[in-house]
Amino acid sequence: MQVEDTAIPAVKIVTPKKFGDHRGFFSEVHSRKAWAEAGLDYEFVQDNHSYSAETGVIRGLHFQLAPFGQDKLVRVARGRILDVAVDLRRGSPTFGRHVAVELSADNWRQLLVPIGFAHGFCTLEPDCEVLYKVTNVYSPAHDRGLAFDDPALGIDWGVDLARAVLSDKDRKHPRLADLGPQFE
């Protein structure tokens, strides 16, 4: 397993080893032991799986408030996405900045998004399957969002936003300036 820092050190790129032969491949995509040896101490309690049929599907930006905050480990089983994490930790030197990483079935990278970040992704090709582990259960009462198209964030999603496919809920999230403190 390879662990890389991003421009925001709390967000990590984790790339599991992949062993291939004439039959296909095998990969241990998560090992608690290997993570502990790498200094990553997370206890994932739920696995989520999403499918998006079209290119340009944007899901996010989402986060949960305490006590239901979620660390996320995101990977792609089929297709290619742009995965985005926005720092919402007030007082952080990177508050309001984001990391955008391409994840795909081919590059086998995973993105570790810690509590205190809004998370979202955009499909860069059709028929994408995204899997992610979380460290806490979903709580509708603690579920929040951030505007995916907030100019203050400056996120280049890699698709024409006029043609992006979003849920009604994701089109109505507040901008960062209107969000108020979420994570101190």
Image (cartoon, rainbow, N blue to C red):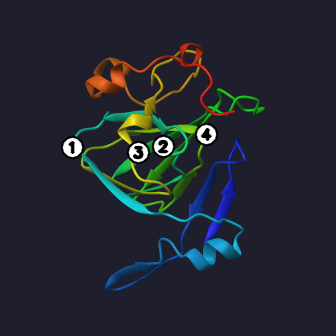
- In the rendered image, residue 126, in percent from the top left (x then y), is placed at 26, 44
- The residue under label 3 is which amino acid type? Ile
Residue visible at 66% across and 65% down in the picture = 40
Q: Earlier in the sequence, mark 4 or mark 3?
A: 3
- The residue under label 4 is which amino acid type? Gly
Q: Earlier in the sequence, mark 3 or mark 1?
A: 1
Instruction: Name the residue that disc number 4 marks.
Output: 116
- The residue under label 1 is which amino acid type? Ala
Q: Earlier in the sequence, mark 4 or mark 2?
A: 2
Q: Earlier in the sequence, mark 1 or mark 4?
A: 1
Few, some or many residues within 10 Å of mark 4 (<14, 14–19, 20+): many
Depth order, front residue of 74/101: 74
Residue visible at 48% across and 43% down in the picture = 83
Verify CB contact (< 8 Å) between mark 1 and mark 4: no
Above or below, comparing residue 116 to residue 36 in the picture:
above
- State the CA–CA distance, disc 1 to disc 4: 29 Å
Describe the element under mark 2 as helix, strand or loop: strand
Instruction: Name the residue that disc number 1 marks.
Output: 53
The mark found on residue 83 in the picture is: 2
Verify CB contact (< 8 Å) between mark 2 and mark 3: yes
Instruction: Name the residue that disc number 3 marks.
Output: 81
Above or below, comparing residue 55 to residue 167 in the picture:
below
Q: Earlier in the sequence, mark 2 or mark 1?
A: 1
> Nearer the observer, disc 1 or disc 4?
4
- In the rendered image, residue 153, in percent from the top left (x then y), is placed at 58, 22
- State the CA–CA distance, disc 4 to disc 3: 22 Å
Please tell me in which quadrant of the rendered image residue 35 appears. bottom right
Describe the element under mark 4 as helix, strand or loop: loop
